[in-house]
């Protein structure tokens, strides 16, 4: 039986009680009650249900740290993913559309041919790796029923790119945690192509015949705003990770600068601005004391204040027009893409991808009624 | 039968044979008692008086055995086997009249059922859903005990109804006795993987899934955990809310489980009503707003109003032990009612 909060609290130290009350005044009684219960549950799993541990957690929470960082994990569909500051915490909105996309891909596969071929997925700004890991899990459920919730048997080869070293490291750990193997990467795919760095993605297992049905997930560090991203970085990858892809997904930073300063402290003070700020060229230095990566492109692309910088880059990547000899199409013919967007951005982003020649687009709402995803077929 | 008796036909036959075992046993006992009585009757007029006395004694005992078979044992074998024998149970408790005190008593009852269901000997697994709705004084606003395991539903289903408590509440400073109530509803629990195909109780198209609470801009703007979900089964208007888990996925699964239970409960209730209507019988239907039991702390008394049974050991009841006494009595009453219905049917046809 679960812990009975008030009874448990009456037996708790005065410190725990005081912290719980402070948390309750910050986030409301019901939420505080629930969170304390989840903390206790998490501690009990680690056999550390001591009051000192709980009060340490509570103190962090009262100081505004997100619960997910304190507990170290977050549920995402049927998965439990590791969460660690400052990597963006997976959101329920993202969980919802990723599950919807998985279901769509599975149905698509059922009616189509080449059911047995592996599915190539590229996820940009991958963060914890939540999107490709959920897609891979839902689609790759092996013949024994597997972990996949959809009972599909589509093995997925997923590539995840992120500009932050912490994100790539965490995504790698999450891949292993979810039973994915990663593909051996020989070349260094560092953002600036500086030869000094060693590849971050180390293979955990080489996908051999025994892993035929196993999904793979390979996170790399790369800047999608870099002009050489598609032509050089992706093109130099091993064949099974190279373009073109069946599915392109991205939850890029999309918060405009003027909204960034208004964010709740638990977001602004704890999560990586590189995962949030849709205007990376803006003077973040004043806000955070960090120097953002220098993006290429025109002034407008360097943060026009609308938070759409990354969508301009994404639109270029899915463009079927401006292809020169160096560039291959990033998404296969008949492939699809899904980009998460901020509230009020969906129509503008839809315009951007239509401007790039994509004719079939849709806007998906999240469970709270907000236009959340621009989906397209190439 | 095949040699290892494992073909599907064999399994069906073995199952049938197994089901007939109690009938066969009862019949052979009855037959041997009858044969013994036949042999005893001539001895009743034996010349030896001590032999006559012995025979009379034996005849009386055999006659009793025979009439017991006819009045109780055979009829009980005629009763149809429970169609819900394999189901687990969801036991919902809601405080009624009495505010905080009712919520406290709901928590007490929750403990009673959890202890009863979890005690050794019953191979049931329990979990508490809705534990997040505890009140500040230690009561519960609304809580569900999930009892997994065959037979749980059949055993606990009679607990549905209004439970009344008479005691001096812990929160009462003047020492006055309050009367409060808790409503209990026991639903059949359908295991997830056991329900698909033609048995499916609903179509996904009829279920509206909603998330609760506004999230403002949502997405990257908000990192608060938000996992509460609410299901609405449009044709019946049944709604289920779930918010215990951090995972929305998990809350959704549990909510669907509860929805299945509610719909199966409706189906069972409807089936019973249909059967009764077909018999045009006037047997009263189960009324869930009926007051079924009273717990009087001052007198250490628990009374079940349906079977008129009182026990004077409330403490033992609260430990979960004495509940079985009531459940047995209620099962007997249900069997007798079913038998009466059956006899009524036979008379009509």
Image: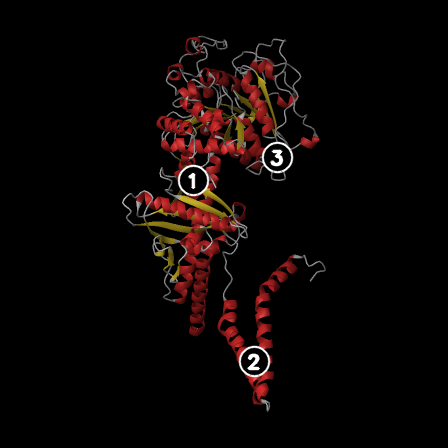
* Secondary element at tag 1: helix
Badge count? 3
Question: How far apart in space, not on screen, are marks 2 and 1 (Cα)?
Answer: 61 Å
* Secondary element at tag 2: helix
Horizontal and vertical percent for residue A256?
40, 16
The one of A271 and A319 positioned closer to us in this rendering: A271
Marker disc for residue B131:
1
Q: Which quarter of the figure has residue A244?
A: top right
Asked if residue B262 is positioned above or below residue A44 in the image, the reply reads below
Residue extending farthest bottom: B47
In screen coordinates, is B270 left or right of A49?
A: left
**Residue B189 in view of the camera:** no
* Secondary element at tag 3: loop
User: Which residue in the protein does label 2 denote?
Assistant: B58
Front disc: 2 or 1: 2
User: Which residue in the protein does label 3 denote?
Assistant: A115
**Quarter of the image with the N terminus of chain B in it:** bottom right
């Amino acid at each position: 039986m679960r812990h009975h909060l008030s009874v448990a609290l009456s037996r708790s130290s005065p410190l725990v009680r005081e912290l719980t009350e402070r948390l309750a005044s910050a986030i409301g009684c019901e939420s505080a009650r629930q969170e304390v219960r989840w903390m206790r549950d998490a501690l009990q799993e680690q056999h550390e249900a001591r009051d000192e541990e709980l009060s340490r957690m509570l103190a962090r929470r009262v100081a505004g740290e997100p619960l997910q960082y304190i507990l170290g994990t977050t549920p995402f569909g049927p998965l439990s993913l590791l969460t660690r500051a400052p990597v963006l915490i997976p959101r329920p909105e993202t969980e919802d559309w990723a599950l919807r996309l998985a279901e769509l891909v599975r149905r698509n596969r059922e009616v189509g041919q080449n059911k047995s071929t592996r599915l190539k997925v590229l996820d940009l700004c991958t963060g914890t790796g939540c999107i490709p890991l959920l897609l891979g899990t839902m689609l790759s459920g092996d013949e024994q029923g597997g972990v996949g919730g959809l009972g599909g048997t589509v093995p997925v080869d997923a590539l995840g790119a992120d500009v932050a070293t912490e994100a790539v490291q965490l995504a790698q750990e999450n891949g292993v945690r979810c039973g994915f193997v990663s593909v051996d990467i020989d070349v260094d795919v560092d953002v600036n192509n500086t030869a000094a760095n060693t590849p971050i993605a180390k293979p955990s297992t080489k996908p051999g015949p025994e892993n035929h049905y196993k999904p793979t997930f390979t996170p790399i560090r790369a800047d999608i705003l870099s002009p050489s991203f598609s032509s050089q970085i992706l093109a130099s990858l091993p064949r099974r990770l190279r373009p073109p892809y069946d599915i392109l997904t991205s939850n890029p930073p999309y918060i405009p600068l003027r909204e960034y300063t208004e964010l709740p402290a638990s977001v602004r003070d704890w999560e990586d601005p590189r995962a949030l700020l849709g205007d990376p060229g803006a003077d973040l230095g004043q806000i955070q004391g960090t120097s953002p990566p220098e993006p290429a492109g025109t002034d407008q692309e360097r943060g026009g204040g609308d938070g759409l910088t990354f969508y301009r880059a994404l639109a270029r990547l899915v463009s079927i027009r401006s292809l020169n000899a160096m560039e291959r199409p990033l998404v296969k013919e008949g492939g699809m893409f899904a980009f998460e967007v901020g509230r009020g951005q969906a129509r503008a982003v839809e315009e951007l991808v239509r401007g790039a020649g994509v004719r079939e687009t849709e806007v998906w709402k999240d469970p709270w009624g907000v236009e959340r995803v621009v989906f397209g077929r190439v | 039968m095949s040699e290892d008796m494992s073909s599907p036909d064999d399994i069906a036959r073995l199952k049938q044979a197994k089901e007939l075992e109690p009938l066969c046993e009862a019949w052979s006992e009855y037959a041997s008692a009858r044969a013994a009585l036949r042999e005893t009757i001539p001895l009743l007029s034996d010349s030896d008086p001590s032999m006559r006395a012995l025979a009379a004694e034996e005849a009386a005992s055999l006659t009793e055995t025979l009439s017991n078979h006819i009045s109780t044992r055979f009829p009980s074998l005629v009763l149809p086997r429970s169609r819900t024998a394999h189901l687990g149970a969801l036991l919902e408790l809601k405080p009624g009249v009495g505010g905080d005190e009712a919520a406290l008593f709901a928590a007490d009852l929750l403990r009673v059922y959890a202890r009863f269901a979890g005690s050794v000997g019953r191979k049931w697994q329990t979990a508490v859903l809705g534990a997040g709705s505890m009140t500040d004084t230690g009561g519960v606003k609304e809580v569900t005990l999930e009892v997994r395991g065959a037979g749980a539903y059949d055993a606990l289903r009679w607990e549905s109804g209004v439970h009344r408590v008479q005691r001096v509440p812990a929160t009462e400073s003047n020492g006055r006795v309050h009367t409060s109530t808790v409503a209990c509803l026991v639903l059949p629990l359908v295991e997830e993987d056991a329900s698909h195909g033609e048995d499916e109780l609903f179509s996904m198209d009829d279920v509206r899934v909603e998330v609760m609470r506004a999230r403002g801009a949502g997405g990257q703007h908000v990192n608060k955990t938000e996992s509460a979900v609410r299901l609405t089964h449009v044709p019946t208007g049944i709604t289920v809310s779930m918010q215990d888990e951090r995972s929305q996925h998990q809350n959704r699964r549990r909510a669907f489980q509860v929805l299945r239970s509610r719909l199966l409960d409706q189906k069972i209730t409807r089936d019973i009503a249909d059967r009764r209507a077909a018999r045009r019988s006037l047997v009263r239907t189960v009324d869930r707003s009926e007051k079924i039991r009273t717990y009087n702390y001052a007198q250490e008394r628990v009374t079940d109003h349906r079977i008129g049974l009182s026990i004077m050991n409330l403490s033992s009841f609260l430990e979960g032990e004495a509940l079985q006494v009531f459940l047995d009595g209620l099962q007997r009453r249900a069997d007798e009612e079913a038998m009466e219905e059956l006899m009524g049917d036979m008379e009509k046809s």
